Image (cartoon, rainbow, N blue to C red):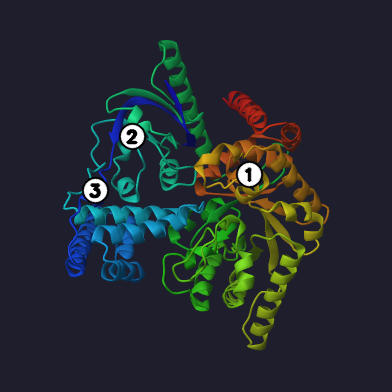
Amino acid sequence: MNYSGTAVSEGVAIGTVYLYQRARPQIEAYSAGTPAEEAAAYDAASLAARAELETLRERLLSAGDQEKADIFGAHLELLTDEVMDGEIREAIREEGLSAPQAVERVFTAYAALLSQMDDPLIREREMDLRDVCGRLLRGLAGEAEEPSLSRLPGPVILVAEDLLPSDTAALDREHVLGIVTEVGGSTSHTAIIARSHEIPAVLGVREICRLLHTGQEIILDAVEGTIRTEWSEEERASYEKKRRQVLRRQARAKQYLACTPVTRDGVRIEVELNIASADPKELEPARYTDGVGLFRSEFLYMGRDQLPDEEEQFQAYRRVLLAYGDRPVVLRTMDIGGDKPLECLELPKEDNPFLGNRALRLCFQRPELFHTQLRAALRASVFGNLWLMFPMVASIEDIRRAKEALRKAREELGAQGIPYAPGMKVGIMVEIPSIALLADKAAQEVDFASIGTNDLVQYTTAVDRGNPEVRQYYQTFHPAVFRLIGMVVRAFSQQGKPVGVCGEMGGNPLTAAVLLGLGIRRLSMGAASLAPIKELVCAIDCEQAREIAETVCACSTAQEAEEYLRGWFDHLICQEE
């Protein structure tokens, strides 16, 4: 039998299944008491969970594993969050809910609000919430801790419904040949972990835990996104060969990490990094990049009950600018609201948040928030090469209104004698088709553009990218998307203004080849994509890329485009090898 899902971390694995199933406490079986008794039970479970988390964190710190210890540190923060704690107690006291019911309601509500996110940092917070919720529910049910993944029986392919942050923190990575889960996509926590450790992974395989069993031998093809349970000896040999090819390709790509990305015909391509915070860990790859192509500023607003003030924002932006020196840092103004809710900002629930009051629209509605951020960004601009970018732009009016808000912030700082960089570049994200179609007019208003391909695909194909029921309609290789990108590049290039790409397309060698052919010269991506993209750049020339782009734009379907690109890429690999 063959099963399919989404390949999120390339590779091939042949091995036996280790089925990891997390017990779910049965809330219905819980015998509820009085509100006072339920509050006491909740207190006891919280104290026990805190003790568990502190023990796990200290154990990892003693072992020198700061990265894993930070996961449990984040869980401690959520466990002691005053807002959620207050809502749980209120549900017990005012509504007469049992402690498990109150815990599940509050944690699930907050997690659901974040579940539509494609921002890795924010999605990880959603998984952290579910993780802490499960720990509390187990404590309330009097159940022991989950079985740990720290000691696996040998080299295995891990199969699970999903992996929570605490699962991956304990994961015996040396013995994990591959990962298969029922849920998750390319931006999920599990995908990020798999890519960072080069573990082949296929996610979103429906009911796979019911279909496989521990000890069963399978072939995991995380290139095509398939799992096979039956094969011939000839087929097995073919997959072994494919596995070796992928490993050689990955080893070869790593050699390009420190190289300067120049095409075979001598065109310099700017390879930049997407970051979500000013954390030193996120800034480690700085030495391998030409700048920050996307600095998601909303990290400062997430997981807290008070809005960040101007000084806090200024210091965060300043840290990143100092790390990058003269290289550009593209700061996206806050892209929150709608599908990106905040605990520190009360926003009305929307039926369709992706089409709602988010990003720049919210900034216009709450000008005091926008003004504070603009002041912080302008103050930080003197410490490096800051480029400011407005997201969710749909019209020329949006651009002019945002620029007017920036002008007022500049005037205010000038009147107060506070320095800022007068020549700071100002640009927009192109992620809505309406502004892509008006790119010639938009280029007259701004200094640069960056194409947010995740949303551009979503809005062009009219698909909620967070809805698994319509996943097949979210088509990254859709020729219409590439045609729109080509229009934007031509319009800005005619006016001598740069266009970059900061969505997932920029970090995928298949789509990056098309982008280069369309005239894109700035690509921004996650750290795991830096080496493969640099390798691609060094292996291709611009005329070849232009022919690829023309072919893709002439395709009738996304499938046709993808098949052509995969065939071309396989040919390129054979030439390189």
- Residue named by callout 2: 158
- Residue named by callout 1: 261
- Does the rendering let one see residue 511? yes
Q: CA distance from mark 2 to mark 1?
A: 36 Å
Q: Is residue 409 above or below residue 286?
A: below
Residue 529 is left or right of residue 74, and the answer is: right
State which tag comes first along the sequence, 3 or 2: 3
Q: Secondary structure at mark 3?
A: loop
**Which of labels 3 and 2 is toward the front?**
3
- Does the rendering let one see residue 57? no
Residue 105 is left or right of residue 497, and the answer is: left
The amino acid beneath tag 2 is Leu
- Residue named by callout 3: 26
Category of crowding for the residue at label 2, using alpha-carbon neighbours closer than 10 angstroms: few (below 14), some (14–19), many (at least 20): many
Q: Is residue 416 above or below residue 107?
A: below
Q: Secondary structure at mark 2?
A: strand
